[in-house]
Image: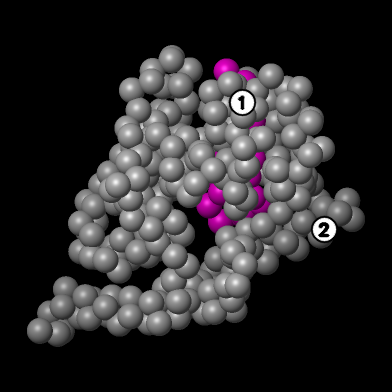
Amino acid sequence: MRIFIISMDDPIHTYDFIKNIINERPDNIVGVAVAKGNRLTLSKGKSKIAYIISLLIIMGPIHFFMNSLVTIRHKIYGILHKFSIISDPSILGYANSLGIRTFNIDSPNESAFIDTISTLNIDLIINQSQCIIKKKVLSIPKLGVINRHNALLPKNRGRLTPFWVLSKNEMKTGVSIHFVEESLDSGDIIAQRSYDIEHNDTFNSLVKKNYILASELILEALDKLENGNTEYIINDNKYATYNSTPSIKDALKYRVNMIIKFLRINKLFV
């Protein structure tokens, strides 16, 4: 199976997720592309400053600044690489070190990129970029384009799902590997796994659990596709729920509820 990966250059979670796929399937990866955009990329009309403040409130100052430091360090290493002081710290650098063809692109939907990958005889594309994949790209791989989603589809489509499952006091969450369609987080589910949300779980702990689970589940999905197993879970639109980018008000409400929850757990609040 010939696999092409489209990603963002995210050092916090995505790098290790993509690296794991490459390490487990080195002979199958025919190319890796990094598209512009990151976790702060928002749809038109959304305030990036408000979103950053929301993330600070949701994650808490310690986790927020630790993640910020990792991102800043990664950017500094990238600058040092441009001056040939260190090796390329990006996922493209890692892929290059293994002899995998790499692409630095603005968008996977740009014509030149589409023309190039159309010649690579691709069976499957794994998308972990922040770009909405358009029909021309979706039609290239024989098996389709797949994505990792941090929730139990069809529920909780959209952004920052670990935050929303906690905000809605849901009892379970998990990870879904699904086919990509032009509509948001639709497409049949190839593999899905759930787990119970513990009383002491936070946004940060759910994100960590989800990425550990996703690294296992994506390999399970690849095996299933390679073996021609088409027993998919229907991603039924009539059961779908949608989450938007959380506002500062949403974040503050979540933080207050988490504080009350912590006090109750520790019997400091009735």
Q: Nearer the viewer, mark 1 or mark 2?
A: 1
Q: Nearer the viewer, residue 29 or 246?
A: 246
Task: Kindly identify which residue carries mark 1.
Answer: 141
In the image, residue 33 sits, relative to residue 49, either above or below, namely above
Query: Residue 69 is drawn in which quadrant?
Result: bottom right
Residue at 15% across, 84% down: 268
Give amino acid for label 1.
Pro
- Give the secondary structure at mark 2: helix
Q: Is residue 131 left or right of residue 149?
A: right
User: Residue 209 in the image: x percent, y percent?
Assistant: 37, 51
Q: Residue furthest bottom?
A: 269
CA separation, marks 1 and 2? 36 Å
Residue 170 in the image: x percent, y percent?
Answer: 23, 60
Classify residue 118 as left or right of residue 166: right
Provide residue 137's location: percent of width, then percent of height: 65, 35
Residue positioned 53% across, 52% down in the render: 13
Q: Amino acid at mark 2?
A: Leu
Find out whether residue 12 is within the magenta segment.
yes
| Residue placed most toward the observer, 60 or 140 | 140
In front: 29, or 122?
Answer: 122
Q: Which mark is residue 80?
A: 2
- The answer to which of 244 and 83 lies nearer the viewer is 244
Colour style of the rendered protein structure: one colour
The residue under the point 38% across, 41% down is 176
Which residue is situated farthest in the front direction here? 238
Residue 19 in view, yes or no: no
Where does the magenta region start and end? Answer: 1-18
Please tell me in which quadrant of the rendered image residue 246 appears: bottom left
